[in-house]
Amino acid sequence: MMFMVPAVNVADLKETTLLNMGIFALFVAITMIIVIKASKNNKTAADYYAAGRSFTGSQNGTAIAGDYLSAASFLGITGAIAINGYDGFMYSIGFLVAWLVALLLVAELLRNTGKFTMADVLSFRLKQRPVRIAAAISTLVVCFFYLLAQMAGAGTLISLLLGISDWGGQALVIIVVGALMIMYVLIGGMKGTTWVQIIKAVLLIAGAAVMTLWVLAIYGFNLSSLLGGAVEASGNQNLLNPGLQYGKTETSKIDFMSLALALVLGTAALPHVLMRFYTVPTAKEARKSVVWSIWLIGLFYLFTLVLGFGAAALVGADTIKSAPGGVNSAAPLLAFHLGGPLLLGFISAVAFATILAVVAGLTITAAASFAHDIYASVIAKGKADAATEVKVARRTVVVIGVLAIIGGIFANGQNVAFLVALAFAVAASANLPTIVYSLYWRKFTTQGAIWSMYGGLGSAIILIALSPVVSGAKTSMIPGANFAIFPLSNPGIVSIPLAFFLGWLGSVLDKNVEDITKQAEMEVRSLTGVGAEKATEH
Amino acid sequence: MGHEAQETDATADVDFKEVQSTPRFQELRKRHRSFVFPMTIAFLLWYFAYVLLADYAVEFMSTKVWGNINVGLIMGLLQFVTTFAITGWYVNYSNRKLDPIAAEIRHEIEGHEFDKHGNQISGV
């Protein structure tokens, strides 16, 4: 049977361009109507940033899944499994297990102590100004890295799905995606963004489920024969064994450890994920949303296992690698192989929606952080009224949207899953130590927070700049130059422990004592939910 | 921002240091930490043990168990199972051991907004 697989002809894909565009336009039209309807009640800052705290746990959990399952997850992981087999699967595991950090240590306590942004929690019992600025800067940097990854993904996807292969045409489509995203966020705020994410999550998981069942049906619902088919088609006996991608040298093995560390500690420090916990009315609903998202995300990653090996068996690694979009094209090519133009059209529309929804979530997080943490608290010194703050946030949305478009045009062609892994490393280094210390360590001080945040952020970025990602290798961003003195492509194994160490060192060396009343207040609030902001009523 | 004003009013006169020193709050803190800390250490150890095995014990992980399904795949799928199990365990623990005390303390401080079960009283 494996030998009768009809070859996927990449040239055929272009004939489905109109259909792809039609399905995508339909998605945009429907979600736009919902966004406009949902935005009718946007009045206060809590409405705009936190959707009036009116979503239920299961709605928010679905939206979190929609926020988290980015193009990197869907296209990147499926492609990584199709090409690198078992090593690709390990991405899924890291991305999923990471949610336990969020569930056990962060989600509920954060919901109880903050209002809109990550900085609310970090600066709660420390000196407002310096900690807020540091937290806002790291929020903006992480969001920007993540945005670049999504926009780069948009470019790759377009080249494959819309048959637009010239640079100018792809740039035009990135501009359209960016403009749409700006509209969603401007009109709908967090409520509109959340609805887009919910719809997208349902479509994505349903689409992946259909394809998974289809692939399994071809192999008589026997996972072992599917795996056998993948090995046979690839001609590589080691496809099912670990080490195909990361087992080559001692350095690459350590690089893999570094990646694993960044993945598992990064999720609970991603600002756009943290901000989602503010859209529910209570900590109990925050817990419910994490539980809901763990189930959805886990289920989805199980699907990617089948889809990845399915693509290896049915489409073949050579076809995938030579298609426009390369590794990222495995899932769309598999869809085309299974269900022809219609399924491809549906899956491509879902992939576009995925990028759009994640980009919208990142943009509103970055805008909220700028308007709430930098403008309202630092520039206007807390004297800005809510209306002005929301106005600033809206303007920031436009600025970030334009930056993302420009960045996306230049990042076009970079490896998507990889850029996302870097965003995870930066988040885990810059944010996680301070989040954990300020929630659990009484003696944590402002100096510790500042050292940890800037130290983690700075070391992660410097190490990335000096790594083979940027220079010194064929796949680098600047292939011509070589200043890669740091051998690992993921900085996590150095920068994360360093940031934890700096947080401890800065605190024990700090001569200033923090306000113990504030510490008591934060601890009581975080565990009991006293005084936490409720849902707004209209 | 009317909602924020409300919130500060509701808790402005609360002595959080006193609440923090009550045995009941200390018990809540102890119950929370005695669950989440060991559990976090446990799943991180299990995750890194798995990563190290995949990294340095390739032959063991490649041992075929049933058809084409090898030890590595089974251990990977077990990571999914443990993640789901810990999630369920934590929810169960919180519902039984954490939420009742937290609701009691909160009820005392802002009794006019929540009933004993932590549900918001409507119309307030």
Image (cartoon, coloured by chain):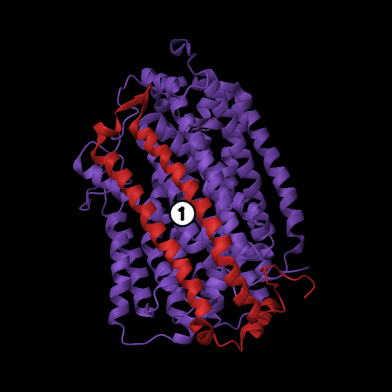
Chain colours: A purple, B red
A338 or B60: which is nearer to us? B60
At horizontal 58% and vertical 50% (from top left) the residue drawn is: A292
Residue A522, x across and y down, in percent? 50, 77
- Asked whether residue A538 is in view, the answer is yes
Q: Secondary structure at mark 1?
A: helix
Q: Quadrant of residue A79?
A: top left
Residue A220, x across and y down, in percent? 52, 18
Q: Quadrant of residue A80?
A: top left
The answer to whether A307 appears left or right of A342 in the picture is left
For this orientation, the residue located farthest to the right is B123
Count how many numbered circles sit on residues in the image.
Answer: 1
Residue, disc 1: A100
At horizontal 60% and vertical 43% (from top left) the residue drawn is: A353
Residue B18, x across and y down, in percent? 52, 87
B60 or A148: which is nearer to us? B60
The answer to whether A107 appears left or right of A345 in the picture is left
- Asked whether residue A114 is in view, the answer is no
Q: Amino acid at mark 1?
A: Leu
Q: Quadrant of the C terminus of chain A?
A: bottom right
Tell me the chain of label 1: A
Q: Is A263 placed above or below A215 here?
A: below
Q: Is A538 placed above or below B77 here?
A: below
Residue B59, x across and y down, in percent? 24, 31
Q: Is A294 placed above or below A170 here?
A: below
A469 or A439: which is nearer to us? A439
